Image (tube, rainbow, N blue to C red):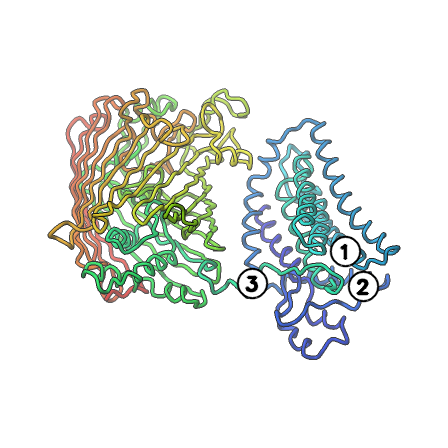
Amino acid sequence: MIRSVLMLVPLVFVGMSTAYSQDEMTKTVPDFPQAVNAAMAPDSHLNLGEAVSPAVPEIRSSRTWSGGFRGHIADLFEDQRQIWSSPFRAHPSDAVWLIPLTGLSAGLFVTDRQYSASLPQDPSTVRRYKNVSNAGIAGLVGGAAGLYLFSFPTHNEHWRETGFLAGEAALNSLITVEALKYSFGRERPYQNGGSGHFFQGGTSFPSEHAAAAWSVAGVIAHEYPGTFPSLLAYGAASAVSFARVRGQQHFPSDVLIGSAIGFLLAQNIYRRRHDPEIGGGSWQPTDETFVEQKSHQPGYMGSPYLPLDSWVYPAMERLAALGFVRSEVIGMRPWTRLECARLLSEAAEMQPEDSSPQVRSLYESLSEEFSHEFRLLSGEQNVQVQVESVYSRVTGIADTPLTDGEHFGQTIWNDFGRPYQQGMNAVTGASAWTAAGPFVIYARGEYQASPSAPAPSAAAMNFISSADSLPPNPPLNPIPSISRFRPLDLYVGMNLANWQISFGRQSLWWGPGVQGGMLLSDNAEPLNKMFRINRVSPIQLPSMLGVSPAIRLEFFLGQVAGHEFVNNGEQEGVTNSGLVGTYGKNLDPQPYLSGEKLAVKFTPNFEIAMAKTTLYGGPGNPLTLKTLFKSTVGAHLGNSPIGDGRASLDFTYRIPKLRDWLTLYGDAFQEDEISPLNRPYKAAFQTGIYLARVPKVPKLDLRIEGGTTSPLNFPTCVSCYYSNGQYVNGYTNNGQLLGTWIGRAAQGEAIQSTYWFSGQRKVGVELRHRKIDQQYMPQGGTQSDVAVNSDFFVKSGFELSGMLQYERWQIPMLAANRESNWTSTIQVSYWPHNRPK
């Protein structure tokens, strides 16, 4: 039912924006000049209130507020005819406002029932808010009617027009809303337990109070432009809308749709009927402003995010470490393709062609990759459809691998949660994207296959149930073989003034290291249903004390998968207390994960960032606007049932005198604190150094990283990181850890060195060691890996990648003796747009 509603609602919005055809509009102005009639031919488009050509003044019908009664009735019938037939005249430019509005509506449809259920049900409170909404609408309508009536004795034509146009807008919005109400038949929040079902004879969707309030407010705010009249009019309309929700008369989505209908109809009528000679301001539609002024500006161009496993990130980081990029934010990835091109334009200013062969090679490879984006930066129109890659990978594993990064360890990590077991594993996939103006659509999916495996031992499963406070006696089920198609990143996005808003399955990496961020990495599958707002390019702040900081911000809300249990305890406000769940059956609904990050680039050498995530929702803890707000401001701390919070602080610093080759970085992590700085003795951390070029061997780099998730001076929290007493399945998505490869209650070190033949041809070696804390797991455990990898592009656009790894591990909980395995991977990829020099 909801899906059908979401398909119909955008058509209603388009109807509000394209309510009158231009050819019929000119018929009402018989003395209109011939040149203007030609400019407004029937094949031209008029949207969001019948916008006219910028070179043509706005028209005023010969039959407005001063016409006769029959003329007004005729106008009203014509208004309604055009409103309901307008979806057939929709134009692509309407997407500038229609897509964000539809996305917001969809989000409210998902959460508004839970939000309404969380509101106070006290009859006196409900009655008070109903009175507020009625008083607000009476004030707006009465004020407009008063202007109209008092205009006759005072002969004030501006008052008369204001009152008449406000009434016309309100009447049209009410007729439209009433027709929709009885078509959709949604029950009100106080009916049938607040289920909000559609097509049940209700009258909740959309809100007529909101529609009338916003239609009147829109006319008044533009007839009397200025800060105070706008605040007064829109403030009153907002109060009416808010009170209808708080008074249990409407769901949030009902109010949003009603408000949008009223606002757009007011815009339509004002632009067609307003007489600029008697006063008032202009009303420029959003889509026209965008098309005329913004469509060729990079800040308003949609651009896909680069996949986190792209070769671009290590190449770009090396170029930055060599001193040729100034404003990159390493700790917030992925980056958009346009942002990468902007960073390369910084490098171009420093004349990399006159630098060392290593810098020239990196710059040339990256410039070839982003040649199209360079043209967009120069003002070219943003319209493109691109197959990004087609790839196939085979991974063979001899002997038993580690597959549980949260409890024991992983043989393969930072691989988007792809399944693997002993034997032959395969992945075949493709990715593509399209961009048009401010919009972007990205899709990446793949076929995944892995063999079956025996059931974990009873000792291992009992240890997990005990460590995670799960029910005793977990089932010992064999691991089935996997043969499936799986979407990875799959999203739609819109970029407005360098703020890219996107929705879908999306990957995030928060941290400066290459082994994995403490909060977020690509170790697990991308989060599903993620709503994300990302400042894709830094905001440059005014200079202070000779320093010009640049900041980036990001917010997301997504849903995890694979959680089977939640323990709500006996906390107040929770409907399902105690441990809820069953082995082998996922919770419904699954918990949500929200996050915010702020990064500040004080100088080209120094970057620092703070971030926070909260896991909440699920049975007994509904996701509402209230819980989302509390999570964002940190109200989850302490014993609150809001959720499970984590925070991080990371930095990157290039030593000035050694700027072109030595970088230091770190990532601190904290449970249930607003920041790791609050109680640093409790913090887990990762640190690293990166030598972009080894002395005497300029084509060779070196990276050393290490860290621990066992606090050095907090013995009561040995195993508390990545675990929680409420969300007992841990900080995971489909069973894979969302954070660092070090995992839970362990310490790890990694050494990695790469020899760069060119920007897209390199070989590397990596050594990794990990030790599990014995206070967490009886007898602890160790894991050691050594791997050789290579990555070569050829001129035809093909990429050949390979890896050979030997691993040795000893974890008595899993096996009595020391175990080892060999892992080999071969991948062939084709990049249609990539032609290395």
Q: Amino acid at mark 2?
A: Ala
Which of 652 and 154 lies nearest the eye of the viewer? 154
Q: Residue furthest bottom?
A: 34
Q: Quadrant of the C terminus?
A: bottom left
Question: Is tag 2's residue or tag 3's residue first in the polypeptide sequence?
Answer: 2
835 above or below 486? below
**For residue 11, side relative to residue 172 (left or right):** left
* Image location of residue 717, percent across then percent down: 32, 23
- Mark 1 or 2: the one toward you: 1
Which x, y percent locates residue 307?
34, 52
Tell me what residue is drawn at x 20 percent, y 26 percent: 812
Indicate the amino acid at tag 3.
Ser
In the rendered structure, find residue 683 and report the number of the disc placed on it.
none
| Residue designated by label 2 | 74
Q: Which residue is mark 1?
A: 162
Answer with mark 1 or mark 2, whichever residue precedes in sequence. Answer: 2
Q: Which residue is mark 3?
A: 93
The answer to whether residue 191 is seen in the rendering is: no
User: What distance separates the C-alpha of mark 2 from that of mark 3?
Assistant: 30 Å
Q: Does 749 sit above or below residue 549?
A: above
Helix, strand or loop under label 3: helix
Q: Residue furthest front?
A: 545
Q: Is residue 113 left or right of residue 310?
A: right
Q: Position of residue 658 (x, y in %)?
A: 21, 48
Could you say which quadrant of the image residue 794 lies in?
bottom left
Decide if residue 411 is in sight here.
Answer: yes
Q: How many marks?
A: 3
Q: Secondary structure at mark 2?
A: helix
